[in-house]
Image: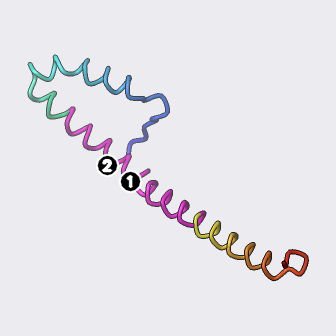
Amino acid sequence: PIGFTFSGLNKTNENQLENNFSSEQESNPFLDHVCKAFKDYLKEEINREFGGLESRIDRFQNRIKAATLLYEKERKELFESSPQFSF
């Protein structure tokens, strides 16, 4: 696959690219087809590279929640079992 750098591509740049091509696309069906194919290709590459990122973040957040609950449970048990904190 061809390598692309996305570091400088933000939403503004993306909109500028779409605006630059929009007038040419209307007058050139072949260019419209090429641009759509290229955009689809970029989406596939981005999904392949970053597609699992959202689920990895969710799993990480779930691990943090589980660790926090375990910490709170153990802290409570320690607090309740410690003679210096008994009333």
Which secondary structure lies at badge 2? helix
Where residue 14 is drawn, which disc sits there? none
Q: Position of residue 60 (x, y in %)?
A: 55, 61
Q: Quadrant of the C terminus?
A: bottom right
Describe the element under mark 1 as helix, strand or loop: helix
What secondary structure is the magenta-colored segment mainly? helix
Q: Position of residue 38 (x, y in %)?
A: 26, 37
Name the amino acid type tagged 2. Glu
CA separation, marks 1 and 2?
6 Å
Apparent side of residue 57 relative to residue 42 in the rendered image (left or right): right
Mark 1 crowd level (few <14, some 14–19, many ≥20, 10 Å Cα) = few
Direction right: furthest residue? 84
What residue did someone put label 1 on?
48
Percent position (x, y) of residue 7? 49, 33
In the figure, residue 35 lies in which quadrant? Answer: top left
5 in relation to 52, above or below: above
Name the foreground residue: 27 vs 69: 69
Identified at 81% across, 82% down, the residue is 81
What residue appears at the point 70 percent right and 70 percent down from the top-left corner? Answer: 71
| Label 2 CA crowd tier, 10 Å (few <14, some 14–19, many 20+) | few
In reply to whether residue 53 is colored magenta, the answer given is yes
What coloring was used for the rendering?
rainbow
Q: Residue at x 43, y 51 (%)?
A: 50
Specify the segment rendered in magenta: 35-64
Which residue lies at the image location 19% right of the left edge and 36% below the top edge? 36
User: Do labels 1 and 2 touch, CB within 8 Å?
Assistant: yes
Q: Amino acid at mark 1?
A: Arg
Q: How many marks?
A: 2
Q: Which residue is mark 2?
A: 44
In front of the other: 28 or 9? 9
Tell me where residue 6 appears, x and y as whole percent: 45, 35
Q: From the viewer's perspective, is 27 left or right of 44?
A: left
